[in-house]
Image: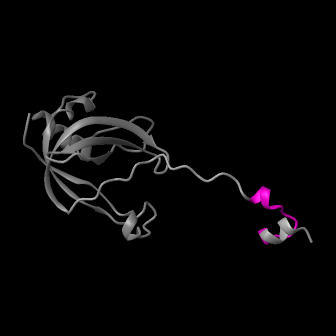
Amino acid sequence: MNSRVAEAGLPGQATEQLDGPDPVCSDNPYPRYKPGIYEVLCVSAKTYLDPRFRRWVCCLVCQILGEKDRILGFLNMGSESAPAANRGSEYWRVWVMATGSQPRRGRLPKKEFVGKVFSVLIDDTTTRYDKREHSEAAKYSTIKEFVARIGP
């Protein structure tokens, strides 16, 4: 018997065929904060179609005042062919909070969030998208609710 096959433990397979490159992680870890109310500055807003959930999402990237790390808030915008923000949506609610007025029909530009200071509720994300529990090391914090606009 070939010694390489014996090392691999699989009949008919050479070790070189089983030992490919190590995977590469392209993500930095999300920060973790004690759950509570924080003041944050929204520094950017990005809209994308999430392939895992097949829905449009607006990701608000926020800086906690007095901290160096950033934290993310996610606003669901539906699963239609284009993002939507109707009266009952969280995007609509936070957009009205950011602008101080109700919108007319038409686009609700995400740039309205940038540069605004909000009071937010931050808590841990403890489960995966499929409802399985994260390990303690995999838990991370996100913005769970935008409570109020408190600054410019």
**Relative image position of residue 151 (x, y in whole percent):** 7, 38
Instruction: Single out the residue that lies furthest toward the front.
Output: 3
Q: Is residue 108 visible?
A: no
| Quadrant in the rendering for residue 125 | bottom left
**Relative image position of residue 140 (x, y in whole percent):** 33, 59
In the rendered structure, the answer to whether residue 114 lies left or right of residue 1 reads left
First to last magenta residue range: 8-18
Residue 149 in the magenta stretch? The answer is: no
The residue at 37%/70% (across/down) is 136
Q: The C terminus is located in which quarter?
A: top left
| Quadrant in the rendering for residue 135 | bottom left
Q: Nearer the viewer, residue 68 or 119?
A: 68
**Relative image position of residue 146 (x, y in whole percent):** 18, 49
Q: The N terminus is located in which quarter?
A: bottom right
Q: Is residue 5 visible?
A: yes
- Number of numbered markers: 0
